[in-house]
Amino acid sequence: MDGAPTIRVRSRPVSPRDVRLLHLDDTDHAILDELRVDARIPNKLLAQRVGIAPSTCLARVRVLRERGVIRGYYADVDPRAVGHDLQAMIAVRLDSGARSHMREFIAALARLPEVLDVFFVAGANDYLVHVAVASTEQLRRFVADQLSRNPDVAHTETNLIFEHIRADGHH
């Protein structure tokens, strides 16, 4: 060996707390910055932009994925392009008795086709749910059928989204 540190990746899933403990160097941050702008960038170009060999770049990206730093690659589909002209952010407060099965509730909610994102938040509400639907009638049905009729839900508040501007990915 040439004295370089060995990177060992655990085979078990990495918890969010473990991810915070990972040390990322300047090269890791440069890779992440490039991937935030274009997750489809070819490895050779990514390596060139961050100033490392393509094989090193591929290995680093693989480690970042395995350690849970890179959680996935996604297509950013415009909801309007698929007929979902109406977006809303719905604040959801659960009943205090539902706290023991919050994980199951939110997993079921996240599987619904109208749901784009779910945020667990601090404050008066427990979750913010970003949804996209075709009409106000569909939004009304979603809130009534999926949320208000659920005995775990104590309160909802729906805010319409007039425009959604995605951040450019640089932090």
Image (cartoon, rainbow, N blue to C red):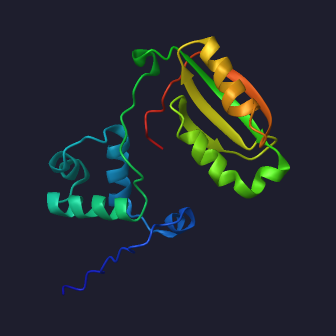
Residue 60, how many percent across, how many down?
A: 28, 62
Q: Can residue 160 be seen in this view?
A: no
Percent x, y for residue 140?
Answer: 68, 18
Give the number of callouts. Answer: 0
Front residue of 75 and 31: 75
Looking at the figure, which quarter contains the N terminus? Answer: bottom left
Q: Is residue 129 above or below residue 135?
A: below
Q: Where is residue 56 in the image (x, y as percent from the top left)?
A: 20, 63
The image shows residue 135 at horizontal and vertical percentages of 58, 12
Left or right of 169 on screen, residue 21? right
Q: Would you place residue 111 above or below residue 17 in this image?
A: above
Tell me which residue sits at (66%, 47%) in the image. Answer: 105
Locate residue 39: give its quadrant.
top left
Residue 97 seen in the current view: yes
Q: In this view, does 133 lie to the left or right of 7?
A: right
The quarter of the picture where residue 129 lies is top right
Image position of 165 (left or right of 147):
left
